[in-house]
């Protein structure tokens, strides 16, 4: 079950880049996802938006947490924490933190972005080394991508069958292009009722975690919140599904289709 929470946070961010004047979220928003591994209610993950300050500037601070629960924690204990600090106006990241323990596999990494010098410094605290990356174009970290793209696409710009690419910096993979395809609209049955969604097909690396490049599907609510509603994936071993389970502090009304 390693990288389950990477799957959730990365897939949550795959929308479409465009200009949008109205923010999709605000401080106080809290999302909880229930992850199912096969027949097990394996774990949960949360994302919470806060205010913070970096170098005298007020920024968004998002904290993502993931933990196994119940029967699954006997076999594989997970305790993950991800944090991102990013600009309120343009969404560029200033700091990213990844501190995880997944069945004894641990990481303690911090990335600081210097946009004036077009570079980022990765500090691997566990292994005591630093690495510098050149930032040639706009770039996002794993968490800031989710919120940046929620604020920067319009549904009218989505074209079924077309693919887009997003540049991201992540400690395991460095700077990489994340590609996905828009597949159209679909109505999902959820615990909240029927929800109209946009469906996406992210392209992922096959072999290590995922069964094939097209093993991952993502559904995003087709309202002003643009929430990840469901994620499904065929893994190298088994399959996993993550559903939005609880929410609080949404900026906009969550639209449910009434029968």
Image: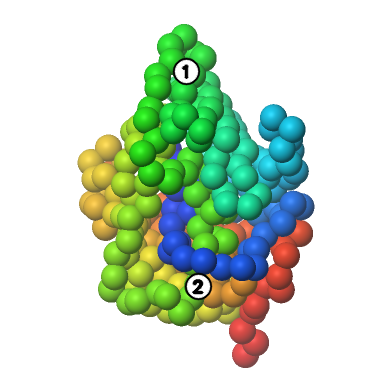
Q: Secondary structure at mark 1?
A: strand
**Residue at point 57% right, 52% down?**
90
> Can residue 36 be seen here?
no
The answer to which of 33 and 221 lies nearer the viewer is 221
Mark in the foreground, 1 or 2: 2
Q: Secondary structure at mark 2?
A: loop
The answer to which of 243 and 237 lies nearer the viewer is 243
Q: How many marks?
A: 2
Q: CA distance from mark 1 to mark 2?
A: 37 Å
Q: Which residue is mark 1?
A: 124
- Report crowding for label 1: few under 14, some 14 to 19, many 20 or more residues within 10 A (C-alpha): some
Left/right of residue 103 with respect to residue 201 in the rendered view: right
Q: Earlier in the sequence, mark 1 or mark 2?
A: 1
The answer to which of 204 and 246 lies nearer the viewer is 204
Which residue in the rendered view is the most extreme toward the bottom?
A: 259
Left/right of residue 256 with respect to residue 231 in the rendered view: right
Quadrant of res 151: bottom right
Q: Is residue 144 above or below residue 244?
A: above
Q: Is residue 24 above or below residue 109?
A: below
Name the quarter where the N terminus is drawn.
top left
**Residue 15: image x %, image y %?**
45, 62
**Residue at point 26% right, 45% down?**
205
Which residue in the rendered view is the most extreme toward the front?
A: 116
On residue 154, the disc is: 2
- Report crowding for label 2: few under 14, some 14 to 19, many 20 or more residues within 10 A (C-alpha): some
């Amino acid at each position: 079950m390693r990288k389950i929470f990477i799957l959730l946070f990365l897939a949550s961010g795959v929308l479409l880049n465009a200009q949008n004047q109205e923010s999709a979220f605000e401080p106080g928003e809290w999302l909880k996802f229930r992850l199912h591994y096969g027949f097990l209610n394996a774990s949960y993950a949360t994302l919470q938006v806060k205010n913070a300050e970096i170098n005298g500037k007020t920024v968004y601070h998002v904290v993502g947490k993931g933990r196994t629960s119940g029967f699954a924690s006997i076999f594989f204990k997970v305790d993950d924490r991800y944090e991102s600090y990013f600009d309120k106006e343009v969404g560029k990241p200033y700091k990213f933190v990844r501190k995880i323990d997944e069945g004894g596999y641990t990481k303690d990494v911090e990335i600081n972005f210097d946009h004036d010098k077009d570079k980022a410094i990765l500090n691997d605290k566990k292994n005591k080394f630093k690495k510098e990356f050149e930032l040639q174009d706009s770039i996002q970290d794993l968490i800031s991508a989710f919120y940046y793209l929620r604020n920067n696409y319009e549904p009218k710009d989505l074209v079924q069958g077309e693919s887009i690419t997003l540049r991201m910096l992540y400690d395991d993979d460095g700077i990489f292009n994340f590609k996905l395809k828009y597949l159209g609209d679909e109505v999902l049955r959820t615990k909240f009722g029927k929800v109209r969604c946009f469906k996406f097909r992210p392209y992922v690396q096959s072999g290590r975690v995922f069964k094939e490049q097209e093993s991952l599907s993502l559904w995003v609510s087709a309202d002003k919140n643009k929430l990840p509603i469901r994620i499904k994936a065929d893994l190298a071993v088994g399959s996993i599904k993550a559903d939005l389970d609880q929410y609080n502090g949404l900026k906009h009304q969550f639209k449910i289709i009434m029968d």
